[in-house]
Image (cartoon, helix red, strand yellow):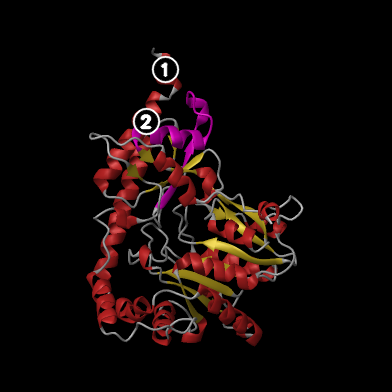
């Protein structure tokens, strides 16, 4: 018996773990590499969680709504796995404000954050031989989900010199009859781009031509502070079917509440096929959504959050994005080809020939963490080697301190500096 417990080689089932890099995984390793001192605290600009900084706080009405729903004792039981009807309706109404065709509650499925919406979307679309088109750089959870669902990933480039727009020629070249969707993240993570109405329409036209759908990741929806206003992809649902993914996390600054959604924007009825609806519902039965009392708070949160709250967040992000770009201009060995106009992050290019003893972006970030106790995300984690992602959703004082340390680090590791010795 003992021999069997060990299991011979022939008896073992090989379970492959996807070797994708995850943001949380690499940030954990970087954090372990820091050496905080009394004079130098660790500053993380690696994660899109603005709640780490006290200047970004959620609206009081959100807290009041959750307390009200919790203390009512009405929401301690299970919710329908697709979400509470009033929650689905509140999100349908919220998103419909900017759409030509009104959504109904049945178009909305409540998920545990936008991450679960990604998993839901890929799981219901998966089929043998399927492939999905993902942006590079992009958000790594898509590739990780695809790996678990045996969906082949094909990457199209975003073009830094054109505001990180989608390379539509590449999309057309990559797609075939097995392509289940094109992922578009707008406002962009990790690039801080906000796409124009025209570009989004071109993406929809391309999807139509390729007979596929658009998966529109709008987790940073409305967090736009540049020339282009935020335009929801659902506006073009009559051109190509759109699955919109979103959450309360970023706009309401409550990422830990895990309240997200998947929405079918599809006036032509592709997603109304009873078999497709049944597939979504059954997958929701597996997942289970967010806590019932959080769901119950959503109608009040959406209806009663004042515009002044959103305005404050936008102004703060605009200011911190500005600080970020100005400080980067002072550092010759890195550059920012596109000033962010939305979301909470920016991609910065490393000029390795100007640096001493830095081999690549991973090496850069680990040495920066060790020497300066500053955490930045290596570009490799989002698909772009020898770039770094900086999250600017931080309080201005911490941001300036971190970027000052980044400048010192780059000076110490520059050829110019070392030539003087």
> Which residue, as the protein is rendered here, is positioned at the far front?
1
The label number, if any, that marks residue 273 in the structure image = none
Q: Residue at x 58, y 55 (%)?
A: 135
Quadrant showing the C terminus? top left
103 and 372: which one is in front?
372
Magenta stretch holds residue 350: yes
In front of the other: 397 or 295: 295
Instruction: State the image coordinates of residue 368 (x, y, percent, origin top left).
Output: 40, 34
**What residue does disc 2 label?**
371
Residue 220 appears in view: yes
When the figure is inspected, residue 172 is found, relative to residue 376, above or below; the finding is below
Q: Is residue 389 visible?
A: no
Which residue has dot 1 on it?
418
Residue 172, by quadrant, is: bottom right
Mark 2: which secondary structure?
A: helix
| Other-residue count near label 1 (Cα within 10 Å), few / some / many at <14 / 14–19 / ≥20 | few
């Amino acid at each position: 018996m003992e021999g069997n417990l060990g299991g011979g080689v022939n008896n073992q089932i090989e379970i492959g773990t996807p070797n994708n890099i995850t943001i949380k995984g690499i940030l954990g390793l970087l954090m372990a590499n820091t050496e905080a001192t009394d004079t130098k605290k660790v500053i993380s600009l690696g994660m899109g969680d603005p709640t780490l900084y006290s200047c970004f706080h959620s609206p009081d009405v959100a807290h009041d709504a959750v307390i009200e729903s919790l203390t009512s004792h009405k929401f301690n039981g299970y919710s329908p796995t697709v979400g509470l009807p009033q929650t689905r309706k509140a999100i349908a109404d919220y998103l419909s404000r900017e759409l030509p065709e009104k959504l109904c509650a049945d178009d909305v499925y409540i998920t545990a954050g936008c991450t679960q919406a990604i998993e839901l979307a890929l799981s219901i679309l998966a089929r043998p031989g399927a492939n999905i088109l993902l942006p590079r750089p992009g958000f790594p959870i898509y590739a990780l989900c695809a790996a678990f669902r045996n969906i082949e990933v094909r990457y199209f480039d975003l073009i830094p010199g054109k505001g990180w727009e989608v390379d539509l020629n590449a999309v057309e070249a990559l797609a075939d009859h097995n392509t289940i969707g094109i992922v578009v993240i707008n406002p962009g993570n990790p690039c801080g781009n906000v796409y124009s109405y025209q570009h989004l329409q071109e993406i929809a036209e391309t999807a139509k031509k390729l007979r596929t759908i658009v998966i529109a990741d709008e987790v940073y929806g409305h967090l736009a502070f540049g020339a282009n206003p935020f335009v929801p992809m659902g506006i073009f649902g009559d051109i190509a079917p759109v699955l919109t993914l979103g959450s309360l996390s970023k706009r309401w600054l409550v990422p830990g509440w895990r309240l997200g959604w998947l929405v079918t924007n599809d006036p032509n009825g592709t997603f109304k096929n009873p078999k497709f609806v049944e597939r979504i519902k059954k997958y929701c039965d597996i997942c289970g959504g967010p806590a019932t009392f959080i769901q119950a708070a959503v109608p009040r949160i959406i209806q009663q959050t004042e515009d002044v709250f959103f305005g404050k967040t936008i102004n703060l992000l605009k200011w911190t994005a500005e600080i970020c770009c100005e400080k980067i201009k002072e550092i010759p060995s890195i550059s920012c080809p596109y000033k962010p106009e939305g979301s909470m992050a920016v991609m910065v290019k490393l000029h390795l020939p100007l640096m001493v003893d830095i081999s690549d972006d991973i090496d850069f970030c680990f040495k920066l963490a060790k020497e300066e106790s500053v955490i930045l995300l290596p570009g490799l984690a989002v698909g772009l080697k020898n770039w770094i992602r900086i999250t600017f959703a931080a309080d201005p004082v911490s941001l300036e301190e971190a970027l000052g340390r980044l400048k010192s680090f780059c000076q110490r590791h520059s050829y110019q500096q070392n030539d003087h010795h």
